[in-house]
Image (cartoon, rainbow, N blue to C red):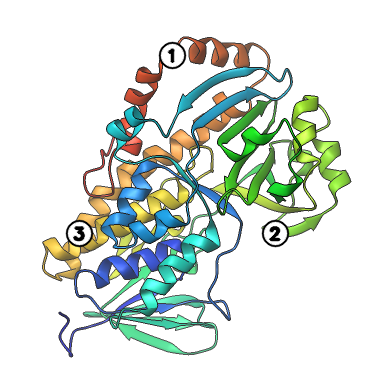
Amino acid sequence: MAKKDQPVVLIAGSGIGGLAAALGLASKGVKTTVLEKAAKFGEIGAGFELGPNALGALDYLGVGDAARDVGVYVSRLVLMDAVSGREIFHVPVKSDRFVERFGNPWATMHRNDLHNVMLTAARQSYLIELHTGCEVTGYDQSGAQVTAKTAAGDEFTGAALVAADGMWSNVRRQMIGDELNALGHTAYRALIPSDHIPAGLDWLRDTTTLWAGPKCHVITYPLSGTRLINLVLVSTDKRYAPPGPVAGAPISNEEVYARFDHTHPRVKGIFTLAPEFKLWAIGDRDPAPKWVDGRVALLGDAAHPMMQYVAQGACQALEDAVCLAHAFETWSGDIDRAFSEYEKRRTVRTARVQILSRAVGEHIYHPCGPHADVRDAILSRMSIEEFYDRMIWLWGGNGINSQAA
C-alpha cells in the first residue's frame, strides 16, 4: 500500500500507453497523476490488432479478463494478392497449437472499447489521479523532482515524468529533438457495419485479411463483437501524401476509389461498402538513442513510433508499461535504477520491431514484379510451424520475459 507522503509519478498522455503505465505502477503501490491534453478522455482511431504478447501484458496490468470481453478472435490471418485476387499465405491464430505456442490467441478490438476498459480501471484506483485539458509542453528538473509544464500555464511537480504523449510527443522533442520520418504513406480508414456485408463476404467477420499490392495494401478485420468491419487502405504513392501531419481528415469516397482502382474486383467489392473514409498521414521515427533524461522517461509512441505493418504499436506500449512496473518493483521504488533498467530492457527490442515494421511494409505489403514473386515463393514454401518459430520472439512474451533480439 502506498504511503501518504509517497512521491507521485507524472504521466503525460492518457492513451493506451499512458493508462497502461498508470495501471502498472498502481499495481506496485505507486501513485500517479495522468495529464491528458484533450478536453475529455478517449481514443482517436477505430480498430487495432493485438498479438498474444499484448493480451499477456493486459493480464499483468490486471485488466486482461475485461479486455478479452471486448475482443474479437479471428480464426486466420490471410495474405492475398491485391491485383490477382489469389491467396498467398495464411496462418491459424485461434487454434490450440497457436495458443500453446504463444500463450494467447490473436485479438482485434475497437480502440475505444479497450480504452474504456482501462479508463474504468484507472478511475477505480485511489492511486491514479486523472486530469484533462493538460497538454504537457515541456519539463524542468531539479534534484529528485520533475516539473511538467502545460500549454495552459499550469505546472505539476512529481518525483518523475513518464511521457506517453504519442508520436508528436512534446517531451521527446525536448529530450531528443528528432523529426518524424515522413515516408509518404497515407492511410484511409473506414468502418463498415456488418449488416452491410452481402452474402458471400461472411468470411470478413472471422478473418484478418490483408490484400498486398504494388505500392498499396488493404486490410480488413472485425470489431465490437463482429458488428463492425474495420477497413484500412494504405497507399505509398507519394503523390497522394499530405504535406504535413493529418489525423482523421475527411476525404471523398471517389478520391479513395480512384487511388485503388488498380486492385482486383474482389477488393473493390469490399472497400466500396464503406459509408465514408478518413485520411491519416503515417510515418515513424528512427530508433531513439536514449529514452531517459534524469527522472524523465519515454513510453509507447513517444519512445518508438513505428509503422503499423506488424501490428505492434499498441502491443509494444503495453509491454513498456509492464516492464516499467516490474522495474519499479525490482528496485523498490528507486526511480533512477528503475528507469535505467527499463531503458536497457526495452530499447533494443523495440528498435528491432521498428526496423521489422519498415521491412515488412517494403518486402511483404508493397512489392511489385520480381520483388513480389520472391515474397510469394518464400511464403508459399513456409510451413505454419516455421512461421510460428519465426514469430515466437515477438509474440511470446509480455514485456518482462520478452526476447530483446
- In the image, what residue type sits under mark 2? Gly
Figure quadrant of the C terminus: top left
* Residue linked to disc 1: 382
Are the two marked residues, 3 and 2, in contact with CB atoms closer than 8 angstroms? no
Q: Residue 278: which numbered mark, if any?
A: none
* Residue ID at (43%, 56%): 69
Sequence-wise, which precedes: disc 3 or disc 2? Answer: 2
Q: For the view shown, which residue lies furthest in the front direction?
A: 199
Q: Secondary structure at mark 3?
A: helix
Sequence-wise, which precedes: disc 1 or disc 3? Answer: 3
* Residue linked to disc 3: 326
* Residue linked to disc 2: 248
Are the two marked residues, 1 and 3, in contact with CB atoms closer than 8 angstroms? no
Q: Quadrant of residue 83?
A: top right
Q: Secondary structure at mark 1?
A: loop
Q: Nearer the viewer, residue 5 or 102?
A: 102
Q: Quadrant of residue 168?
A: bottom right
Q: Nearer the viewer, residue 285 or 31?
A: 31
Residue 291 location (% of width, % of height): 34, 57
Q: Nearer the viewer, residue 397 or 331?
A: 397
Cα distance between the residues tagged 1 and 2: 38 Å
Q: Secondary structure at mark 2?
A: strand
* Residue ID at (50%, 30%): 76
